[in-house]
Image: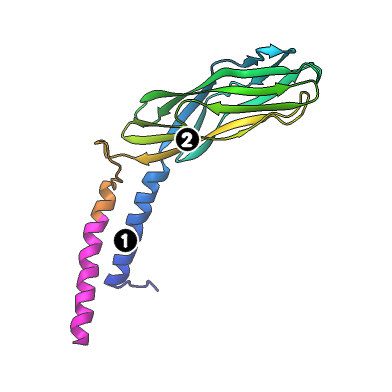
Amino acid sequence: MHKKHSLPTCAGIALALLLLTNASAHADIIWSYNWTPSTTQVDANSGGSGYLSLTNEPSHSATGSSNTVITNIQAVSTAPSSNPATFNQVPISFTLQLQDAASNATSTATFSGYFSGTITGSSSNVQLTFTSPMTETLTLGGNQYSAVVGTYTPPGPPGGVNSGSLNAFVTVTPSNGGGGIASVPEPAALTLACLALPIVGLTGWRKRRAKA
């Protein structure tokens, strides 16, 4: 038997659909990105022979806010502990190229810093310090993208299986196009709201009147 729904129930369903539609608009923002280091081999600038090997990660796509891998890092050296390969503020930068899929709008942001520390054939002690802001915001296709450089994991001793790494988190927020941030409901969502809200208001008024 077909079950009939009351007006309040229909209104609740309409409001639920409104919220789901708006949430879907947030989740469906698709974008692509590519991180590129200024060099994939960072040489020690004093002491023994050694360098850091950085990966140039391929382009990827993501939906909504997501973590991203900037690079993986490995230490390479045969230097003895008596003469370690030394990094004295050796400069490095990482450039993010980001594209909004719906509009094809593209922009870039660069994060700069330097490596300091030492590596030998059996040890690694290298830190990364950023000299530029660690947060950059780009507005593409009416959406705001905020990239924040996150965790740096130093590389282990040369020959280790696990690499060090650097990551960044990109937060995606719909923009109203005027500098502020706002969520703009789809036309269908606005229609549902217009239908549902008067019904909810009418139902509440009838209940209050019945109690009076």
Count of labels in the image: 2
Of 1 and 88, the residue lying toward us: 88
As drawn, the residue found furthest toward the front would be 82
- Amino acid type, label 1: Leu
Highlighted magenta segment, given as a residue range: 192-212
Q: Is residue 24 magenta?
A: no
Measured in 3D between alpha carbons, the distance from the residue under mark 2 to the one under mark 1, in whole angstroms, is: 35 Å
- Amino acid type, label 2: Val
Query: Going 20% across and 65% down the picture, which residue do you hit?
Result: 198
Disc on res. 148: 2
Can you identify the residue that label 1 sits on? 15
Q: Secondary structure at mark 1?
A: helix
Whole-percent x, y for residue 104 in the image:
37, 26
Q: Quadrant of the N terminus?
A: bottom left
Of 113 and 60, the residue lying toward us: 113
Query: Going 80% across and 24% down the picture, which residue do you hit?
Result: 122
Q: Is residue 78 left or right of residue 55?
A: right
* Residue 40 position (above or below residue 104): above
